[in-house]
Amino acid sequence: MTGGSASAAPAPAAPAPAAPAFTAVVSGPFPGSGRPVRFDRTLYNGRGGYDPDTGVFTCPVAGVYYFAYHVHVEEGGGRVSLYKNHLPAGEEGDGPGPLQGGYADQASGGAVLRLRERDRVWLQVPAHRPDGLSVHSSFSGFLLRRA
């Protein structure tokens, strides 16, 4: 090299923080009606917004989110609702139907919600409905776009 100087390579950029997103499943019995369902085993929890101890997602980044649930209903039936800040945010899932002589059914639902930082979202068995949801159930949510 003549007359030049070597330049240092730029430092690699720090990785971007994980987007707010989660998927959680049930590994034990559901609670009674009228309170959040604890999906206590997280499969993914980017940004840690979902609390498996309470079953509640607390929004860490304002924006538009998509939430989905899939529940398996057994013996006695059950219905679920998506809640945002203590108010129902969607329709209740369907109740039981006959399957192989017993009662079993599946319900799925989803909603796009605009959330502010610290808004709370969860799935709940309404107080006026029996519970009978099984461990074959999941709850997911993720950020579509920032506010």
Image: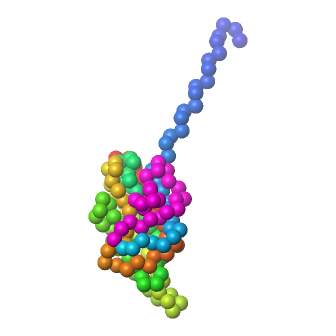
Q: Could you tell me which quadrant the N terminus lies in?
A: top right
Residue 145 falls within the magenta-colored stretch: no
- When the figure is inspected, residue 12 is found, relative to residue 67, above or below; the finding is above
* Front one among 100 and 53: 53
Q: How many marks?
A: 0
Vertically, is 145 above or below 101?
Answer: above
Q: Using residue 48 as the reference point, say whether residue 124 is left or right of it.
A: left
Residue at the top extreme, as displayed: 3
Q: In which quarter of the image is residue 65?
A: bottom left
Compared with 46, 35 (above or below) is: below
Instruction: Pick whichever, 5 or 142, lies toward us.
Output: 142
Left or right, residue 128 beside residue 57: left
Residue at 65% across, 10% down: 4
Magenta segment range? 34-56
Looking at the picture, tell me which residue is in the foreground, 147 or 130: 130
Of all residues, the one furthest to the bottom in this rendering is 101
Residue 17, given in percent of the width and then of the height, sits at 49, 42
The answer to whether residue 104 is visible is yes
Report the residue at 45% width, 59% height from top. 53
The outermost residue toward the right is 1
Asked if the stretch drawn in magenta spans residue 44, the answer is: yes
- The residue under the point 36% across, 73% down is 33
Residue at figure coordinates x 46%, y 84% from the top left: 75
Protein image colouring: rainbow
- Relative image position of residue 133 (x, y in whole percent): 45, 76
Q: Is residue 83 left or right of residue 21?
A: left
Say which quarter of the image contains residue 85: bottom left
Q: Can residue 94 be seen in this view?
A: no
